[in-house]
Image (cartoon, coloured by chain):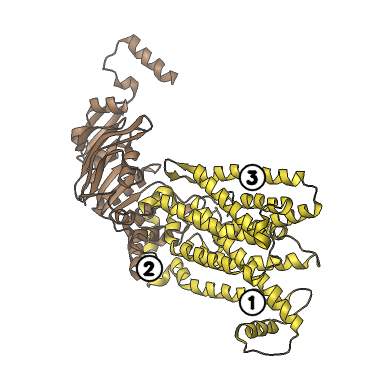
Chain colours: A brown, B yellow
Amino acid sequence: MTLHVENITWRVEEHTILRDVAVDVAAGELVGVLGPNGSGKSSLLRCIYRALKPDTGYITLDGDNVWDLDAREAARRTATVLQETPGEFEFVVWEMVLMGRTPHKSMFARENTEDHNLVESALDQVGMLSFADRSFSTLSGGEKQRVLIARALAQQARFLILDEPTNHLDVRYQLEILDLVRGLQVTTFTALHDLNLAATYCDRLYIMAEGEIVAAGTPDDVFQPALLRKVFGVEAEVQVHPRTGKLHIVFLPAHAASPPDPAPHEASASTVLVGGR
Amino acid sequence: MGAVVERPAQDQSETRPAPALKSKRRDARFPLVVLALVAALLVTLTLAVTIGPVAIAPFTVWQIALSRLTGLASGEWSAAHENIVWLIRLPRVFLAALVGAGLAVVGVAMQAAVRNPLADPYILGISSGASLAAVLVILLGVFKFFGIYSLSVAAFFGAVMSFVIVLTLAQHRGTLSPVRLILVGVALSYVLSAGTSFIIFRADDAEGIRSVLFWLQGSVAGAKWSYLTIPSVVVLIGTTYLVLQARPLNALIAGEETAISLGVNTNRFRRALMVVAAMITGVMVALAGAVGFVGLMMPHTVRLFVGSDHRRVLPVSLLAGAIFLVWVDVLARTIVQPEEMPLGVITGFIGGPFFIWLMRHRRDALGGGQS
């Protein structure tokens, strides 16, 4: 499955939320999109899974414009893992994952053994089979996330969209979830918050700021201190980690970010600054 | 309590035969639950007909019905009994069942459509529109030209009018958001209720006011066979549509964007749900007044037992709603004999405490998770 986003623009009244955004994801790639809050990451994803219709530009999946597909066909190609939960309504894990079969079933069809097997193997794949009869609302954040990924697997889509799948998770689950996604070898486009996770797991990255793509390429290409300063407003040092061989970004607090051997009055000024916060 | 700790248990479950999962067993068992409820409904209908100022044996009820339908059965019963069973009690009991079934099913659909457990069939202003129209008919004699059906016809048009107004005002950029629907519905209900109160307040017709209050609380008294065709057809069509849409309904309560990502055109689907709900509710209100409680609480009660999956909630709500309202009507016509109580008084007095009791004893199932 390949994704192509051709210069989409989306406005709400006079605010331009997305401006000429172009993205390509090749088959089998795991591509991340990063950016500060409000940079338009989620809006971009929402355009791809058809929750939003861009004003100009278009999006294709395997060469077909997503808005030319009917809703169910689009959902058979793209599975999306969001952070939405059923709220007041209780579902057991089994039912949550069985929902993934929705785009595959006509309204007269009943769930059959094949559907049940798909649900079971999806739950098994994310290590949640023993939770099948548990109420979804009683699960921890990491468990919920894995169930939602299982639902995407049961959906049998060949393209996966993830909206900050590691949000609010303990470190261990962050790694587990991304290891899991990586291991699926499904074409994936994911919004991420954590730059180090992105550097470790993604093949390529897009960096967004104020609705535009400001950098694109491999983690080595995009993670430059100057860019991090400009986009995220932080001082950072980018290193290659000796064990992973991946980039490692160390954020520098204000007092360490200033050049070495500061003049005494400068040092005290930055101390006051930190204390003042 | 992480994945690693749980993994041994998971390995065991892999080696177990397929039906080990409780959820799957529950699916397999579900037809039996429906059968049991159908049986309970038949018993309810029969017993409800036997109860009244003149007691009639259950077997006689069946004989009379059979002889009327097929002309085959014959036996020892008086013409008076036959008239009581066939002309008075059976249509009334059937109407109660239809209204209960219809409102319960619409309640399920509404709660899903606006993804709000406090929604009921009347959130689109349908009951207040119908009530205003009914008050106009009863107290001011408007719409007289419809004859004996003027009340029902006016109530139905009142319901449809308020539904159209709510739907139009709730539209924003071509979409119908749940929150807007609820807020516009509530606001319009206040306006229409104010109109109703104003007319009641200005009226000096004590008898008329009494029948208005009665109507506002709902009643199936005076039902005739001829009243049953339209609600039967509407409930049948509406429920069939909803049952066929059980999967999209599940997706919808899982979340707006989740539903979209599962291939549900939420905008179009929500609109269709509104139309079906308004159609059923409008007919029910026109025939039986604004019966409260059933459409709000029956879906919750059912969910406490069978979970949120609409493939189970819809058929069970249909049957449970029918059974519930038949018994409510039995009480309504017996506790203050020979007077009648409006249905809303009974549903409120009995249903409310029952629901609270149920919720406290099964709190694991409602918002508390599994313990």
Q: CA distance from mark 1 to mark 2?
A: 32 Å
Residue that numbered label 2 is attached to: A109
Q: Kindly identify which chain the residue marked by label 1 belongs to.
A: B
Please report whichever mark, 1 or 3, sits nearer to the chain's N-terminal start. 1
Q: Nearer the viewer, mark 2 or mark 3?
A: 3
The disc at residue B192 is: 3
Q: Circle 3 — which element?
A: helix
In this picture, residue A106 sits left or right of residue A1: right
Q: Is B221 on the left-hand or right-hand side of B170?
A: right
- Front label number (1 vs 3): 3
Q: Residue at x 73, y 89 (%)?
A: B76
- Chain of the residue displaying label 2: A
The amino acid sitting under disc 3 is Leu
Residue bearing the label numbered 1: B43
Q: Quadrant of the C terminus of chain A?
A: top left
Residue A254: x %, y % from top left = 34, 21
For the residues marked 1 and 3, what is the alpha-carbon distance in whole angstroms? Answer: 40 Å
The answer for which chain carries disc 3 is: B
Q: Position of residue A53 (x, y in %)?
A: 33, 42
Residue type, numbered disc 1: Val
Work out whether disc 1 and disc 2 sit on a shared chain. no
